[in-house]
Image (cartoon, rainbow, N blue to C red):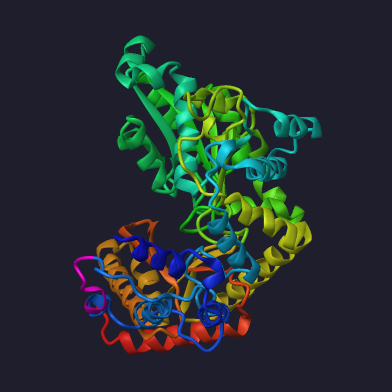
Amino acid sequence: MSDSDLRELLNRHFAVEQVDADVLQQMAGMVRDWLTPEGKSPYPVTPIDQLLPLFAELAPPPDGMAPARVLEELQRKLLPHTARLNHPKFIGHMTQALPWMTVLVEALTAALNQNQVKIETAYASTLVEKQVLGWMHRMVYRAPDALYADAMRAKNHALGNVVNGGTMGNLTALAVALERTLPGVRKHGIYAAMQQSGHRGLAVIASARAHYSLKKALGTLGLGEDALHRIPVDADNRIDLAALEDTIAALKRDRIRIVAIVGIAGTTETGAIDPLAQLAAIAQREQAWFHVDAAWGGALLMAERFRPLYAGIEAADSVVIDGHKLFWVPMAQGMVLFRDPASLDLLKHNANYIIRSNSGDLGQTSLEGSRRFDALKLWVSFKLLGEGGYATLLGHAASLTAAMRELIAGQPDFELTSNSDNFILTYRYLPPALGQRLAQLLAAGRVDEATIVNRHVNELNARLQERQKANGHSFVSRTVLERAPFADGITVLRVVLSNVHTTPAHLREIIAEQRQLGVSLDQSQP
């Protein structure tokens, strides 16, 4: 490349003073249009296979393109085929519609390009991150002010880590729990630590509704996915305490050491909150680490009205909360918090050129190395909304959930299949004739015949959700829940009722659409 080629490249793409105002206006218009909730389809309708020709290039372009052309490609190839999470009828997943300023802050985060691993590349941003962690820790644990003042000054301790989501948060918490249970495992490995421990194996216990990231964490840590012991849930989708005690007794008989007991504070599928206080007491009795996965539900602690739902979370050794869920910040942002500021010392590592001992570098206790300044998004959101603003948003979600619950209860052809206080409901389309037939067969003990009917209902709901998605007018998700006596469980529709643009009128329209689809699809009965 010649000097003139380099100068041209720098002028075109690096020299801010050369930026074409029309390009900036075009980009701003794209963002504004995207954040406008009405008038668009919530879900792309083109089958994914039909999009392949748009992305057929097998190598990067040999020559660069003008910014305006790049934006044109984005508008043609990407935006029309992307789910609009801020559409009022997109109520199927946990990712949120966003305050417009947080989108601009995301751009500022990219422009600053701070690397949070060390103070030399994250000066004031280190303090912002520590302050956010302090605010979040206070929300969960309500420790004395002195602890948070000390944490801001501390150069060798941390209240937690900012992570990119619940998966990394759960991995970090279980890594600390494992090192606490088997001191030296980090250095010497699982095999050597087990040889010295006298235990035949290791276990982590959680409910059947636990997020799959726990299995990934245990596989990554070398315990193996089979080390996760899933406990059945009760009728409210909470961990069954009697079954938990049976599992603990069996593990102890087999000389299996319990590394951690995990409570779920807002399960992904149903929003259920485990009995955290009881789990904390059991974990303390068994001398096991008590971890709470509150990636979804932890943000509700911001509003005092919801705090009783989480009684016992303050006894957790560690807690995971995602900011990109119920704190309404852009993907991806999460936190793992530790009750004892010394806990993360078990993961502390240092190097000669960065993360030196007593440096105050945040990378000393993080499993990640290079890391974005994602704490800024949450810091700005707290400044924008305050505790009162968050309480208002959470209150809207609670009202919307109550409206959907009441709406489903009033429909003769829909059945509410799970309920929660943190904005997740599951239900299914169940025509009255099929519902009556199921009830009659089960009452008569004719389980095999009832199973056939239930499979038909499952298929009907799966096809309904697929057809609703393909039509693109609204979006809900689906899952499968256990229900005795059906070995296949029940296929249910799942809604997450935290979209700030959604109203009860939108919910009524969604149910009406689902009824229409259900009637048209239910052409035959077994």
Q: Position of residue 59 (x, y in %)?
A: 21, 65
Task: Specify whether residue 323 is in view.
Answer: yes
Quarter-wise, where is residue 250 in the image?
top left
Q: Position of residue 340 (x, y in %)?
A: 64, 27
Residue at x 47%, y 70% (from the top left corner): 92
Q: Is residue 466 left or right of residue 432?
A: left
Q: Is residue 227 magenta?
A: no
Return the residue nearer the eye: 229 or 490: 229
Q: Is residue 56 magenta?
A: yes
Residue at x 78%, y 61% (from the top left corner): 388
Q: Farthest residue in the front direction?
A: 3
Task: Specify whether residue 329 is in view.
Answer: no
Return the residue nearer the eye: 259 or 524: 259
Return the residue nearer the eye: 350 or 183: 350
Return the residue nearer the eye: 250 or 433: 250
Q: Farthest residue in the left direction?
A: 58
Q: Is residue 82 left or right of residue 148?
A: left
Residue at x 34%, y 65% (from the top left corner): 5
Magenta residues (range): 53-59
